[in-house]
């Protein structure tokens, strides 16, 4: 089973100025009185075979971004290009054809599977819709997929209520893989699972990526999981991407005060390690009435914060090679923190110990 090859010289997925605003309606006649700016001008690229993690607090627009890319939610504006194809201009038939290459693994393994369908029927559905296999060939493909995600082939005749959360999530992964995609949105795929099962599912996703050359948009709020699986990390706050960098650089040298606060809240991997906790003042503003200027300025504790932060909308600028941040108080620099330290400068605090591998479960 083959799919069209992509051009390795360009990004597999390119998102530019993606927005999704939900209308606020009031009164008997449903008069629109405002907009909830769930996603407000998001831009990023995903390379073939790369894992880009999208992290942030609940309600910041992560899941809406993932679903808008796949057009499970129609974007308000912006551009989404997948392997040179303008996704937002496709009609129903063309979009259905493209969705064979763009799949999603949902957050909740209990509500994302139809309880009236057997496991075999759930995994086989994509093969039938896209006319990839029928009859005995489809049955053999279903058995192969179940084995590939660590389930027994005889489970095909059982129903979702007979499985644990981790097993159901494996079924969801098998369903996504059935149509041979090249890009998968993983919408918090391990957040509803026990910690021991999380490691198994993360290892499975990494093995499948290595074997199939998959690209992931990995949506999560658990930064310890993200550190292990991601190549790059994009930090979202109130519908905006406020920082984007390779995972090791972001965890070692966070630029945005918001990113620094997120990393300081992650429990230390060793009991004897103490980390200074950064407590943010106030609550997250409403996306229906976002603050002017920098969206983070009401809670920012940067020493140089001033009135300009409330007036100027900071662009996402490259502060160092491959490291982007939206902060007017952090000037761009091509000098690494190691070079600054060697010259007598001060290195930012280490928010994370070296990456610890998750133990594989037999």
Image: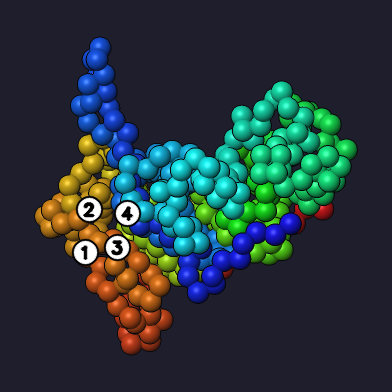
Marks 3 and 1, the one that precedes in the sequence: 3
| Disc 3 crowd, CA 10 A, few/some/many (<14, 14-19, 20+) | some
Q: Residue at x 55, y 50 (%)?
A: 98
Name the one closer to the observer, 317 or 339. 317
Residue 88 picture location, percent across and down? 41, 48
Secondary structure, mark 2, is loop
- Judged by depth in the image, the label closer to the viewer, 2 or 3, is 3
The circle drawn on residue 316 is 3
Is label 3 or label 1 in front? 3
Earlier residue among tags 1 and 4? 4
- Residue holding disc 4: 17
At 71% from the left edge and 50% from the top edge, which residue is drawn?
Answer: 200
Taking depth in this image into account, of 93 and 293 the one nearest to the observer is: 93
Disc nearer the start of the sequence (4/3): 4
How far apart in space, not on screen, are marks 1 and 4 (Cα)?
20 Å
Identify the secondary structure beneath mark 3: loop
Which residue in the protein does label 1 denote?
328
> Are the residues at dot 4 and dot 2 in contact (C-beta closer than 8 Å)?
no
Report helix, strand or loop for mark 1.
loop
Q: CA distance from mark 3 to mark 1?
A: 9 Å
Residue 245 in the figure: left or right of residue 135: left
Q: CA distance from mark 2 to mark 1?
A: 9 Å
Indicate which disc, 2 or 3, sits on the residue closer to the N terminus: 2
Circle 4 SS class: strand
Q: Residues within 10 Å of mark 4 (few under 14, many from 20)?
A: some
């Amino acid at each position: 089973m083959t799919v069209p090859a992509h051009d390795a010289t360009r990004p597999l997925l390119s998102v530019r100025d993606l927005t999704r605003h939900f209308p606020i309606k009031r009164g008997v006649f449903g008069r629109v009185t405002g907009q909830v700016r769930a996603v407000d001008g998001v831009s990023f690229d995903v390379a073939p075979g790369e894992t880009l993690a999208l992290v942030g607090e609940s309600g910041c627009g992560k899941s809406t971004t993932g679903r808008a890319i796949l057009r499970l939610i129609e974007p308000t504006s912006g551009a989404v290009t997948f392997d040179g194809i303008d996704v937002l201009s496709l009609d129903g038939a063309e979009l259905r054809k493209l969705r064979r290459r763009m799949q999603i693994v949902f957050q909740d393994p209990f509500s994302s599977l139809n309880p009236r369908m057997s496991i075999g029927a759930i995994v086989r559905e994509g093969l039938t819709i896209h006319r990839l296999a029928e009859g005995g060939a489809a049955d053999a493909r279903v058995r192969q997929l179940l084995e590939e995600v660590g389930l027994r082939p005889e489970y095909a005749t059982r129903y979702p209520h007979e499985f644990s959360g981790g097993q159901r999530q494996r079924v969801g992964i098998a369903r996504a893989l059935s149509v041979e995609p090249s890009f998968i949105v993983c919408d918090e795929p391990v957040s509803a699972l026990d910690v021991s099962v999380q490691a198994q599912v993360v290892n499975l996703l990494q093995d499948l990526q290595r074997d199939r050359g998959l690209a992931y948009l990995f949506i999560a709020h658990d930064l310890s999981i993200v550190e292990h699986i991601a190549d790059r990390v994009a930090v979202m706050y109130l519908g905006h991407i406020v920082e984007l960098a390779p995972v090791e650089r972001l965890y070692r040298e966070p630029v945005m005060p918001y990113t620094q606060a997120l990393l300081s809240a992650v429990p230390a991997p060793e009991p004897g390690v103490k980390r200074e906790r950064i407590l943010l003042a106030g609550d997250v503003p409403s996306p229906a009435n976002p603050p002017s200027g920098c969206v983070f300025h009401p809670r920012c504790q940067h020493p140089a914060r001033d009135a300009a932060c409330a007036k100027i909308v900071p662009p996402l600028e490259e502060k160092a090679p491959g490291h982007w941040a939206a902060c007017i108080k952090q000037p761009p620099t091509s000098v690494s923190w190691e070079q600054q330290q060697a010259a007598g400068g001060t290195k930012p605090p280490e928010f994370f110990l070296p990456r610890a591998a998750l133990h594989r479960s037999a």
